[in-house]
Image (tube, rainbow, N blue to C red):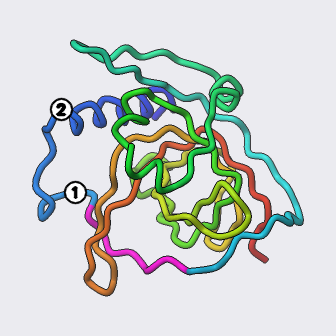
Amino acid sequence: MDRRRFLAAVSAGTVSIISGCSGSEDTDPNTTAATESPTKTPTAAASTETTTKPATSTSTKKTSTEPTTTTKSPEELKQESKEVPYETLFRGFDKYTEDSTPLHYPYGYIYQTRYNFYGDGIHHYQLQVSTTDDEWQGDIAAIWDGDKRLLEDDRVEIWGSPTDLFKYKTVKGNRRTIPRLVLFDATVKDATS
């Protein structure tokens, strides 16, 4: 599946969710068992830095009647990206999805990977993120179909567009809801050994 069609489909699904067309929490197709996130602290030091091949992304602007889709290059989206603290993102998530605000998290730690989770080589990641190197601010789900395979325990820098709130059930039986982003670029800062 071509990346533009996938991102357009994700955007269309997001509009459906925002419009109130989602099911109940018990029948949510996104419900999945996941491990609890670690409480490690990010470090400012990066050993090796590898940049993935940029992907194309679709940005959706919501209007009063129909969404308008515009295609921008990853470099344009990176320039427009904002570093938004996790709590601010979660509290104002609707604003960031409606405005199609591209986000940047300079510090990320992947604690769970699900390869080909969405089919056609599109992977699901869960990671701790932060805008500072002091401490992890919270965790997010991420969709990635880039050329570089990201691994558990990788420390990364990510750029992505918010799509929806991802609901899942942890292995301890707790229900969680976290923001989900479609990544349009990622850099491995410290690869797993």
Residue that lies at the very extreme toward the right in this rendered image: 47
What residue range appears in magenta? 31-38
Q: Which residue is mark 2?
A: 19
Q: Amino acid at mark 1?
A: Pro
Asked whether, in this view, residue 48 is left or right of residue 119, the answer is right
- Name the N-terminal-most of marks 2 and 1: 2
- Residue 25: x and y in percent read 15, 60
State the image quarter where residue 153 is shown.
Answer: bottom right
The dominant secondary structure in magenta is loop
- What number of labels is visible? 2
Q: Which residue is mark 1?
A: 29
Residue 34 covered by magenta stretch:
yes
For numbered disc 1, what is the local secondary structure? loop
Q: Eyeballing the image, is 46 above or below 34? A: above
- Residue 47: x and y in percent read 89, 66
Question: Closer to us: mark 2 or mark 1?
Answer: 2
For numbered disc 2, what is the local secondary structure? loop
Rendered residue at 12%/60% (across/down): 27
Residue 105 covered by magenta stretch:
no
Q: Eyeballing the image, is 171 above or below 12? A: below
How much space separates mark 2 and mark 1, taking CA atoms?
17 Å
Rendered residue at 61%/71% (across/down): 152
Taking depth in this image into account, of 109 and 184 the one nearest to the observer is 109
State the image quarter where residue 62 is shown.
Answer: top left
Rendered residue at 59%/60% (across/down): 129
